Amino acid sequence: MSGRPAVPKLPRRFMPPKVSYTSRAGKEHNVTYEHPIAVRLTHWLDAIALFVMAGSGLRIYLAFPAFGDKLPPNDFFSFPARYSIGGWLGGALQWHFTFMWLFIATGLVYVLHRLITGTWRQVVFLPRDVRGVWPMFRHYFLFGPKPEQVESYNPLQKLAYTGTLLVGALSILTGLVLYKSAQLSFLIPILGGYRAVRILHFLALAGFLAFVPGHLVMVIVHGWNNFQSMLTGWNFKPEYIRNPDQLGEGHQEP
């Protein structure tokens, strides 16, 4: 028997396709086409849409900085209008509604692409990922040891992305109810009333704002190679492929 440690095998559905190429020095490297054009395009368009919608949404909020009846009688919280987008309520509404459709369209394209290609398993948080959350959190934020990565997304990333998808769905639902409150009035009591809809929409914004710093920390920790893969699609140093034996049954070399 060999003393070589067992290498965990993963089904192909959890990993992007592996591609081998030969450098000028004749040394073979492992490289993956990690992010297809649909994923990259929707990622960057979503980033733009979220930036504009957050800024314009905050300007809309400033027109009445409370929820439902003005209780407490003072503002819930306030901030300088210069940090918002739109200049005034009418302008902010135009910005918000315009980029709302971009946000919805890119979200639908992203979800449909993941479902059709079967790559939703790479980003959706599953029960088997629970035990890997704390080790990755400790590594990112408490300078703990780095766990071995055996998939394209680690458990903490998958938890963050799954949570963001749910927050996005909540944001779209409550935003459409606020936008077309007469046509979608039947949804208002289901969601707890108009005040609750505003609160849920605001909490969705808070969820996005909470996601961004953690996402940036992950990008910085993983370095330039990880970032450029969202620009070009190619990951030239995939940490999760160290040995061909890691690839489960059904994986074939191109």
Image: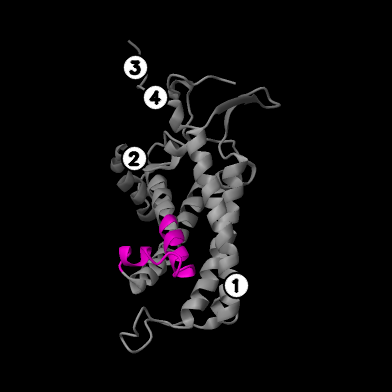
The residue wearing badge 1 is: 94
Q: Which amino acid type is marked by label 1?
A: Gln
Q: Give the camera-side residue of 240 and 18.
A: 18
Q: Which amino acid type is marked by label 2?
A: Leu
Instruction: Pick the quarter of the image with the C terminus.
Output: top right
Determine whether, in the image, residue 128 is placed left or right of residue 213.
Answer: left
Which comes before the other along the chain, label 1 or label 4? Answer: 4
From the top left corner, tell me how far across and down residue 7 is, in percent.
38, 24
Q: What is the image's colouring? A: one colour
Q: CA distance from mark 1 to mark 4?
A: 51 Å
Q: Reply above or below: 75 against 208.
A: below
Q: CA distance from mark 3 to mark 1?
A: 66 Å
The tag on residue 126 is 2
Q: Give the camera-side residue of 19 and 78.
A: 78
Q: Reply above or below: 124 against 2.
A: below
Name, please, the residue furthest toward the top: 1
Name, please, the residue furthest toward the right: 24
The residue wearing badge 4 is: 9
**Callout 4: SS:** loop
User: Residue at (58%, 79%) from the top-left corner?
Assistant: 90
From the top left corner, tell me how far across and down residue 89 is, in percent.
55, 80
From the top left corner, tell me how far across and down residue 53 is, in percent.
54, 67
Say which of marks 1 and 4 sits in front: 1
Q: Are marks 1 and 4 in contact (CB under 8 Å)?
A: no
Which comes before the other along the chain, label 4 or label 3? Answer: 3
The residue wearing badge 3 is: 3
| Mark 2: few/some/many CA within 10 Å (<14, 14-19, 20+) | few
Which comes before the other along the chain, label 2 or label 1? Answer: 1
Magenta-highlighted residues = 169-192
From the top left corner, tell me how far across and down residue 209 is, in percent.
45, 64
Q: Is residue 174 magenta?
A: yes
